[in-house]
């Protein structure tokens, strides 16, 4: 699969890591569907910058299956071809602020449910919506965004980490189901990225602590992380599925 002219969906693609993912794919000549939920102004500004022939902003709540199906149909109508790369990046209201996180004694079922619905239910809705078009095309790439926190919970974000761990399991079971149709399903897991909207509340000393324990001696940038998604979207990864690639400068060895 060539990235050039491929139709790529990036959920939560208007801000934070999602914006960097959208830019990385556009830079390589892909048509990008910039999904957003509440960031309409940023999504429209990004599309204007990338060019309306190359990008489309679509509002959809990924936890709503019908909204996701409508988004996929609109993208196909706009670009005249099915989505063949989908990046499940959307993050439900979360900030990497260790001081404000739910601790184990204050964690609630609602905290867990909110993150599970965003990561797992949202990811499932996207997969179910894009798979028919991928099967029609005879190939497809689904890329789920995970975290290295379930290998190294340097800060115990219980709800976020549990949801991403469940998404990794879904990644592997979906890879088994979809492989016969030429569709790969993989995960990219980052550590703390310097800096995104979600990590903006992280104190500098936390970044410095992580950098000190990382072989590369620095915290991974969102640009570096986004470039890894290009590998999983391309023919270079055509023999890879059901895998979790950790992109954190070598902090965690999976």
Image: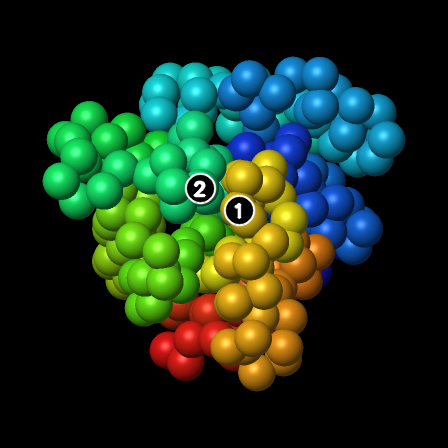
* Chain-order first, disc 2 or disc 1: 2
Residue 38 vs residue 64, the one in the foreground: 38
Image point (39%, 45%), residue name: 98
Colouring scheme applied when the structure was drawn: rainbow
Of the 4 image quadrants, the one containing the N terminus is bottom right
Q: Position of residue 161 (x, y in %)?
A: 30, 51
Q: Position of residue 24 (x, y in %)?
A: 73, 51
Of the 4 image quadrants, the one containing the C terminus is bottom left
> Residue 202 — which label?
1
Residue 174 shown left or right of residue 182 in the figure: left
Q: Position of residue 73 (x, y in %)?
A: 53, 23
| Image marks 2 and 1: residues in contact by CB distance under 8 Å | yes
Q: Position of residue 235 (x, y in %)?
A: 61, 68
Q: Is residue 128 visible?
A: no
Image point (41%, 54%), residue name: 146
> Residue 97 — which label?
2
Image point (64%, 34%), residue name: 15
Q: Is residue 29 visible?
A: yes
Residue 207 shown left or right of residue 48 in the figure: left
């Amino acid at each position: 699969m060539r990235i050039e002219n491929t139709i790529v969906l990036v959920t939560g693609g208007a801000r934070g890591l999602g914006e960097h993912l959208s830019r990385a794919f556009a830079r390589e000549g892909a048509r990008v569907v910039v999904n957003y939920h509440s960031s309409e102004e940023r999504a429209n500004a990004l599309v204007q910058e990338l060019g309306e022939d190359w990008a489309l902003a679509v509002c959809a709540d990924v936890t709503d299956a019908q909204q996701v199906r409508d988004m996929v149909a609109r993208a196909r109508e706009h670009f005249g071809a099915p989505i063949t790369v989908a990046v499940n990046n959307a993050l439900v209201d979360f900030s990497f602020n260790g001081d404000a996180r739910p601790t184990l004694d204050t964690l609630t079922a609602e905290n867990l449910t909110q993150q599970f619905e965003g990561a797992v239910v949202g990811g499932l809705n996207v997969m179910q919506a894009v798979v028919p078009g991928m099967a029609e095309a005879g190939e497809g790439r689904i890329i789920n965004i995970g975290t290295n926190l379930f290998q190294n919970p340097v800060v115990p974000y219980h709800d976020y980490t549990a949801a991403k761990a469940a998404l990794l399991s879904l990644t592997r079971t979906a890879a088994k189901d979809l492989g016969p149709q030429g569709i790969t399903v993989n995960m990219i897991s980052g550590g703390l990225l310097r800096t995104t909207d979600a990590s903006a509340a992280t104190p500098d000393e936390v970044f410095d602590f992580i950098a000190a324990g990382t072989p590369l001696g620095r915290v991974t940038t969102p640009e570096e992380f986004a470039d890894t998604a290009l590998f999983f979207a391309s023919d270079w990864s055509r023999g890879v599925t059901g895998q979790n690639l950790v992109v954190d400068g070598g902090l965690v060895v999976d």
